[in-house]
Amino acid sequence: MNPAVRRTVLWCALAASAAALLPSTPARAGVPAPPLRFGGCPASVPDPPAPARVTCARLTVPLDWRHPGGEHIRIAVSRVRASGTPAERRGILMVNPGGPGGSGLPYAVTKRAKLPESVRRSYDIIGFDPRGVGHSAPADCGPMGGHFDTPGADPVPTGRAAERAHLAALRRMADDCARGAGHALRHLSTEQTAHDMDALRAALGEPRTGYLGVSYGSYLGAAYAARFPGRVGRMVLDSVVGPEEWYDFDLTQARALLRQREVFFGWAARHADRFGLGHRTDAVRDAYRRARARLTGGVGPAEFDRAVYHALGRTERWTDLADGIRATLRDGDTALLRPDAPFDGAESRNYEAANRIVKCADGHAPAPRQVVADVRRMRRLDPQPVLTGIEASTCAYWHHRPAHRTPLGGPGAPPALLIASAHDPVTPIEGAHRLRHRLPGSRLVTLHQDYSHGVFASRGNPCVDRAAATYLVDGHLPAADVHCTGPGLPEPGR
């Protein structure tokens, strides 16, 4: 039998047996949670290099932790055991790849492969799909107001008629999510996921949990620290989301993307002999705008902006973006501006749905007039801003408004190790500075001369990786903030 098929069969058998064995109501306070029954994994979870082995389980949790006797959902969990001796073991390290909407089930394998060996020897790496994601009661918003139409409508409305159409699409998206998620809509929040994490910790029999969260994973970690400060072990928050409302964060990101795009234009100009887009920044900027206006072959401004958003966050993608602009202008060839996977595939649809549902469940929403005013402000900064990441604008028409915003950190929260790239446009470093005040005593590791998103066990920087690994293994935060030197801007690929 094919290994992927065999894992899927085992996963289905595990789920069936777990359904019969797990209780329909949670354990009473003070009663230990039933242990997890680990077995085979879905085909989406890769096998780690031998002799490591990944196994999976399901954890039953209340849909609403405020009413634990009500409806329940199941959270998909993966685990790769520590490879060291019992004396080396430091417990569990939960990991989250970001989003909101990122699947954490395979991340236990893929992230572990990049972690320093000392961390792999010390921790059982625990991945999980947060509620609403992947194999954990996945959310579905259906058509999402035409979000998956190809080519999509221009995401940058120009003029009052276009602004009204933009707001109408946001309203349809909110209505689609309400129909798709139903009564679960208000419960797919970061705060509820933090409760799931603590239930997972208890089911694994651990007094505390180590944690590594990247991007949105940093926000989730700060929420867990706020709710369960006494159960936090060693916590690393990488590429930190700031502690503001999601809509405000989205606007901060959009402004940072404009700054990063100017850096990209200048970089392409310095390599004019390679890309042929012009020897000056303004010439490359003009080539960019002309390419966006000449798109063909099922790629429109929405798809173009998504490609730009995706590329600006990692400098290793800049060559393909510059080549894609050149090919569009020369030949009308938009192949390099298309996503590797179908945007309207099941995984992408789940991600886009969960992303907005979680953001809108976490805090306050903007008014429609504020959404329009902010689009106009962005267009005054640049006629063609990248608005792809402003997902929380949908919250202007959300059907269930949260009573309060998700708390992050606080005076009683334990210190953590925060990591940030100095020029990350996806999670600008200002967010790390703001969040550290919510986690007293924390330290910040900054990777200077770096322009990418995701740092620890991602950029291959020995200074960053050593600081984080030392903390995770030895438990000692650096005496002061750490400053590491990054690679600078890349040489163009061939």
Image: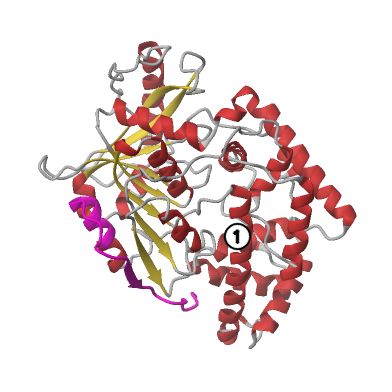
Where residue 68 appears, x then y in whole percent?
46, 17
Q: Residue furthest right?
A: 161
Q: Residue at x 45, y 55 (%)?
A: 240
In the rendered image, residue 230, in percent from the top left (x then y), is placed at 30, 37
Image height check: is 158 above or below 406?
A: below
- At x 52% / y 66%, what residue is drawn? 317
Asked if residue 38 can be seen in this view, the reply is: no
The residue identified by callout 1 is 252
User: x, y percentage for residue 245?
Assistant: 58, 48
**In this picture, is 280 found above or below 142?**
below
309 with respect to 375 (left or right) = left
Can residue 241 be spotted in the picture? yes
- Under circle 1, the secondary element is helix
Q: Choose between 14 and 178: the one closer to the eye.
A: 178
Taking 52 as reference, is 65 left or right? right
Question: Magenta stretch?
Answer: 467-494
Q: Name the residue nearer the viewer: 385 or 109.
A: 385
Q: Is residue 471 magenta?
A: yes
State whether residue 337 is above or below residue 61: below
Residue shown at 33% from the left, 55% from the top: 442
The quadrant where residue 373 appears:
bottom right
Q: Position of residue 75 (x, y in %)?
A: 43, 28
Q: Quadrant of residue 223?
A: top left
Bin the neighbour count of mark 1 within 10 Å (Cα to Cα): few under 14, some 14-19, many 20 and up. Answer: many
Residue drawn at point x = 38 percent, y = 73 percent: 486
